[in-house]
């Protein structure tokens, strides 16, 4: 018979109870992170206030650069260390890092390497930003802790936390960082658009618009002058207008048949105002009107270009409930701007007849509607010259071609000369484009291409 005192199960249970009793009696070992915070601050970090603020994912480069500017000020010394955790999805708050280990809801949190992430800038550049790291900051007698952490999961966000002996000190740091982020935003003065790769996440994409000269904008006499006055001259004189008590927010609607140059004109205007941030709203980005307008307010002076506005601003009786929400948001955002907000809306449409009256008629939303018509005879002649650049045009029947293309758009003429150049190259004639090449191209587009090709190229009734 086995002695119960020597029973393995009894011995194991007793030994476990003994270990738990000894652990409870032994003094708890202070976590390394808490020790560093305590020694740096000169007091119990668990008793010090923490002020925090969350930022959108796309503000990460701005936050990083603003922090670098703050930490790099004269006589300011910093030490940076990282945080590791056995739970990949767990992100500790600064108050948890300052608490005893038993107060941290996740085992395995310790000092580790600083984690960086490469984020895109303009022109293909990238910047390495701290994704998770603790800055121990000292300047004279002042001691601060600045903690940056990016949450993982389906909705990424960025948190900046500041710990100091006094709450006012921490709030002052956040205020300075916010101000620097706004003044030195990497998006200011660039052409950008917003994208939503997944629910709850917004990315900012940089764009490079082609250089468009004034000679490339072929419009009826005086039209470009009126467009520039409302956009470019208004921007140049904003100081004088503000001093005279004139509001700066304004909207311009460019309307006309497809292919007449509305988008090209909008891009030209953007290039003429390089000091302004340009936000493009096209395609799926139209669902991000609120976020785009918020960014425009932050980065003003700004220009918001919304192409094909009829897709979201059609009369409400013709729309489904989902598109109404986009329209209402657009109207609310335009109404919600303060009078001194230097934000220009440039809207384009092929269908001015179906636009929501509240958008097209009410001052403060659209101040000026300008028609961009099909090119007249003089404009068509200039377009032949424009799109003939790089070619050797030997056209004895230019007058006839100008007459035969009555009712076509600029886009049609551009494609006409491109196809004529193709026929020339196919013959081995090099850059020489003659009457027969243009005649063949015109017949192919106008007759063999059918009504759909004409419609796609913005042409009405033409004779081949």
Image: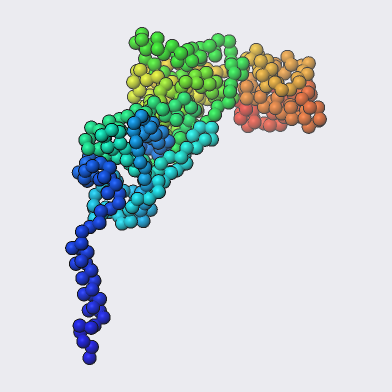
- Residue at 40%, 9% in the rendered image: 240
- Residue at 70%, 24% in the rendered image: 417
What is the quadrant of residue 292 in the picture?
top left
What is the quadrant of residue 116 in the picture?
top left
Q: Is residue 358 above or below residue 50?
A: above
Q: How many marks?
A: 0
- Residue at 49%, 15% in the rendered image: 232
- Residue at 51%, 32% in the rendered image: 122
With 393 as the anchor, is 372 left or right in this view? left
Report the quarter where the N terminus lies.
Answer: bottom left
What is the quadrant of residue 80 in the picture?
top left
**Residue 323 shows in this picture:** no
Q: Position of residue 319 (x, y in %)?
A: 43, 33
Q: Going by the picture, which residue comes out furthest to the right?
A: 428
Q: Position of residue 215 (x, y in %)?
A: 61, 16
Report the quarter where the C terminus lies.
Answer: top right
With 120 as the anchor, is 100 left or right in this view? left
**Residue 390 shows in this picture:** yes
Which of these two is toward me, 269 or 12? Answer: 12
With 406 as the anchor, is 122 left or right in this view? left
Colouring style = rainbow
Q: Is residue 439 above or below residue 134?
A: above
Q: Position of residue 325 (x, y in %)?
A: 38, 34
Q: Position of residue 229 (x, y in %)?
A: 49, 12
Which of these two is toward me, 439 or 268? Answer: 268
Which of these two is toward me, 18 or 121? Answer: 18
Q: Is residue 224 above or below residue 112?
A: above
């Amino acid at each position: 018979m086995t002695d119960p005192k020597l029973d393995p199960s009894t011995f194991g249970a007793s030994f476990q109870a003994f270990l738990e009793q000894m652990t409870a009696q032994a003094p708890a070992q202070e976590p390394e992170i808490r020790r560093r915070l305590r020694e740096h601050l000169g007091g119990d970090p668990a008793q010090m206030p923490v002020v925090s603020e969350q930022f959108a994912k796309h503000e990460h480069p701005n936050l990083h650069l603003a922090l670098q500017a703050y930490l790099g000020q004269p006589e300011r010394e910093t030490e940076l260390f990282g945080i590791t955790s056995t739970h990949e999805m767990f992100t500790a708050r600064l108050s948890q890092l300052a608490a005893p280990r038993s107060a941290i809801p996740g085992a395995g949190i310790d000092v580790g390497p600083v984690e960086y992430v490469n984020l895109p800038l303009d022109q293909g550049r990238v910047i390495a930003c701290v994704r998770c790291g603790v800055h121990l900051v000292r300047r004279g007698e002042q001691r601060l802790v600045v903690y940056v952490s990016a949450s993982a999961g389906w909705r990424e966000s960025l948190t900046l936390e500041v710990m100091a002996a006094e709450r006012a000190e921490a709030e002052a740091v956040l205020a300075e960082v916010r101000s620097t982020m706004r003044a030195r935003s990497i998006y200011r003065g660039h052409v950008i658009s917003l994208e939503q790769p997944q629910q709850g996440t917004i990315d900012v994409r940089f764009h490079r618009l082609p250089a468009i000269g004034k000679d490339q904008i072929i419009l009826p006499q005086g039209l470009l002058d009126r467009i520039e006055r409302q956009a470019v001259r208004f921007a140049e004189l904003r100081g004088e207008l503000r001093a005279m008590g004139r509001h700066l927010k304004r909207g311009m609607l460019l309307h006309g048949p497809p292919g007449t140059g509305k988008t090209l004109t909008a891009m030209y205007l953007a290039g003429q105002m390089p000091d302004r941030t340009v936000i493009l709203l096209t395609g799926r980005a139209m669902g991000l009107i609120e976020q785009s307008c918020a960014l425009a307010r932050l980065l003003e002076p700004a220009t918001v270009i919304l192409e094909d506005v009829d897709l979201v601003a059609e009369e409400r009786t013709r729309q489904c409930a989902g598109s109404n929400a986009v329209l209402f948001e657009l109207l609310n955002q335009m109404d919600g701007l303060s009078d001194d907000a230097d934000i220009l809306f440039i809207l384009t449409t092929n269908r001015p007849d179906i636009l929501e009256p509240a958008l097209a008629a009410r001052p403060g939303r659209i101040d000026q509607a300008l028609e961009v018509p099909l090119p007249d005879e003089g404009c068509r002649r200039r377009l032949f010259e424009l799109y003939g650049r790089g070619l050797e045009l030997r056209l004895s029947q230019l007058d006839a071609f100008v007459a035969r293309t009555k009712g076509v758009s600029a886009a049609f003429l551009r494609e006409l000369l491109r196809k004529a150049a193709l026929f020339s190259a196919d013959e081995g004639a090099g850059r020489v484009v003659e009457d027969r090449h243009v005649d063949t191209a015109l017949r192919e587009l106008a007759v063999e291409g059918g009504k759909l090709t004409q419609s796609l190229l913005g042409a009405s009734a033409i004779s081949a």
